[in-house]
Amino acid sequence: MKHGVRIVLLAGLTSLGCGAEPPPEEGGVAAAEGGAVVAAAGGGLGAPGAFDAQYIDCDEFAGVGLAPIANVDPRVPDDSTVIEAVPGSAIVVAQAATCEQICVGGEFCREATFAQFGVGVAPPGGAPGSNFYQLVFVTDHPILAARLRLLGVNAVFTPKIEYEITPESELFVSVPRPKSFAFELSGPITLPDPNAPPNPVSTFNYWYGTDAFGNVLQQNVVTGIRFGEGSGVVLTAIGPELQAVLGGTTLTFPFFAAPEVFDRADVSVQTNVF
């Protein structure tokens, strides 16, 4: 697991605004949820391979913080370089969103929520936009989860994911599965001004190394994004593996912390990228 240049990716990071069986660790409850993935997907899975998805009319939170690079390195393949933002620390990102519609291949559209946690990396040959190695992806969209899992991505389906903004403008996000990476996000936010002009089109990429499909890329091209302010939001790590990544139970976001709204994200899931 390589790490190198000490780069602060703040400019790129402002562009931050996703199988059929559950992970073995989850046991009975998640096994039932994993069965629901297959049942709900029906004939919609198709053969494993590249596909596209669409996230439409979404509320989102993204936060960028630091974790000890010694904890992160073993979880990132050797062909990607972990970004050492400051000596001894890697950039990590927590993201969650709820969307009026999430579609897979222009079909199977439904209101849905997702969350993910990643590490800032430089992939071989580079890629436009911001790049992160994805440690986990969670959603209540069964076909999206199943299609990603068929590729070998660490994608988890659960209907128990929550994304809430209270009348007092407090954010609360609960990601209870997988248990090893469970976390919550909570804190005061200032919502984006819906009348403000949108920011430029943004691209951010999540990578995941698989055995059967090589390096899988989820490339997100986001349009109509507007930012609020959320520096008071804190991540609470519940799962033991996430605690091991962070070296503790909490993560703050000194580099970037914002509730966001965006009109659309076009997601291209590509296989064997390098």
Image (cartoon, grey):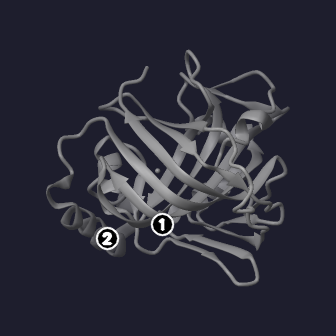
- Please, what is the three-letter code of the amino acid marked with disc 1? Arg
Place of residue 104 in the rendered image (x, y in percent of width and height, measured from the top left): 32, 51
Q: How far apart are marks 1 and 2 (CA)?
A: 11 Å
Q: Is residue 165 left or right of residue 232?
A: left
Tell me the amino acid under the disc marked 2: Glu
Task: Check contact, mark 1 vs mark 2: CB within 8 A.
Answer: yes
For the N terminus, give its image quadrant: top right
- When asked about the image quadrant of residue 35, the answer is bottom left
Q: Is residue 271 above or below residue 75?
A: above
Question: What residue is at 76 percent from the left and 31 percent from the top?
Answer: 84
Q: In this view, does 194 lie to the left or right of 208?
A: right
Q: Circle 1 — which element?
A: loop
Q: Where's residue 208, x and y in %? A: 47, 37
Extreme residue toward the top, this view: 125
Viewer-closest of 24 and 220:
220
Q: Is residue 167 positioned above or below 183 on the image?
A: below
Task: Identify the residue position indicated by label 1 in the image.
Answer: 177
Q: Quadrant of residue 204?
A: top right
The residue carrying mark 2 is 33
- Provide residue 85's location: percent of width, then percent of height: 80, 34
Residue placed most toward the observer, 150 or 16 = 16
Q: Residue at x 76, y 65 (%)?
A: 234
Q: Which residue does the image show at 67% across and 41% down from the upper left?
A: 15
Residue at point 80%, 27% (across, down): 7
